[in-house]
Image (spheres, rainbow, N blue to C red):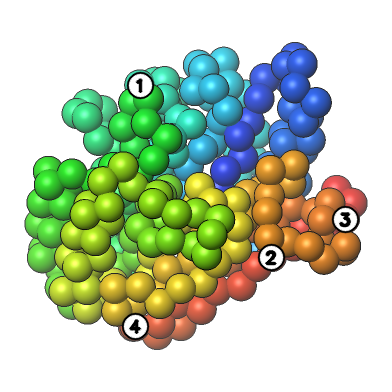
């Protein structure tokens, strides 16, 4: 099974005065075209899809994502407005239509996909309360022998001096780590938010953070060749307990 991951596109309206508005749209547009050439089974979007959480931004985001051939699964980031996101993607059956959290499970693929909502209105840092932990524990106990991939916007660990204390309450990130360590079927965790490429052993599995597709906010990618080119990630379930991942650099010309 092959998965593509995109993250932190921070899409702005076409008429925005922000100087990077068209650049960000172009980065996503080019990435979508390249993803289609790779023919993944699904695309995972790990949050901060738009910049201001506006309905008009989500409408534009849908326009940019419309050419995708593979099924798309979104999870909210701190820049996202969950009410507006639900309204914009109300035809996507996997998204819960109500409730405080945009958690969900996708059972349609060789690996079980579990999306975790780490956001709270007005909060930039991650939140993972007891209620969310209970939901995840219940979901993971349902199929303990099936390979499962988690995806969440906020990484539940520090990244050098660039990303420290990413959760509003540190004990919540620790509790999430402890919970996942008790479920051996979890083959990986995919995150966004940091805009920085990171791979880390975590909770008995591996966690990967992909850099922002929006190159004006991307960090940690210094190579001259890559500096002006969108980057996304490809993840392949190599066997029942290993996820192989690689960065995919989009061609320098459309």
Q: Quadrant of residue 168?
A: top left
- Residue 99 as seen in the image, left or right of residue 166: left
First-in-chain label (2 vs 4): 4
Q: What residue does disc 2 label?
A: 248
With respect to residue 166, does 232 lie above or below?
below
Give the numbered dot on residue 83.
Answer: 1
Q: What residue does disc 3 label?
A: 252
Check if mark 1's residue and mark 4's residue have beta carbons within 8 Å: no
Residue 237 visible in the picture: no
First-in-chain label (4 vs 3): 4
Question: Which residue appears at 35% of the width and 58% of the height?
Answer: 156
First-in-chain label (1 vs 4): 1
Q: What residue does disc 4 label?
A: 241
Residue 210 in percent (x, y) is at 57, 59
Mark pair 2, 1: CA separation: 32 Å
Helix, strand or loop at label 3? It is loop
Residues 194 and 97: in front is 194
């Amino acid at each position: 099974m092959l998965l593509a991951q995109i993250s932190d596109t921070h899409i702005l309206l076409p008429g925005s005065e922000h100087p990077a508005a068209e650049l960000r749209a172009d980065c996503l547009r080019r990435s979508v075209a390249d993803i289609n050439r790779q023919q993944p089974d699904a695309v995972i979007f790990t949050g901060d899809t738009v910049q201001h959480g506006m309905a008009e931004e989500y409408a534009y985001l849908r326009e940019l994502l419309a050419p995708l051939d593979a099924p798309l699964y979104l999870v909210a980031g701190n820049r996202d407005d969950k009410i507006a996101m639900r309204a914009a993607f109300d035809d996507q059956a996997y998204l819960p239509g109500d409730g405080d959290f945009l958690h969900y499970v996708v059972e349609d693929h060789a690996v079980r996909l579990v999306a975790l909502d780490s956001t709270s209105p007005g909060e930039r840092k991650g939140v993972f309360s007891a209620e969310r932990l209970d939901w995840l524990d219940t979901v993971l106990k349902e199929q303990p022998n099936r390979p499962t991939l988690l995806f969440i916007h906020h990484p539940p660990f520090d990244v050098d001096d660039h990303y420290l204390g990413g959760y509003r309450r540190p004990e919540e990130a620790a509790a999430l780590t402890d919970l996942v360590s008790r479920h051996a079927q979890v083959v990986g965790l995919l995150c966004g938010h940091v805009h920085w490429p990171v791979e880390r052993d975590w909770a008995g599995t591996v966690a990967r953070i992909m850099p922002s597709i929006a190159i004006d906010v991307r960090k940690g990618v210094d190579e001259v060749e890559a500096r002006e080119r969108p980057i996304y990630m490809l993840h392949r379930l190599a066997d029942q307990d290993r996820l192989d991942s690689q960065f995919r650099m989009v061609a320098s010309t459309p």
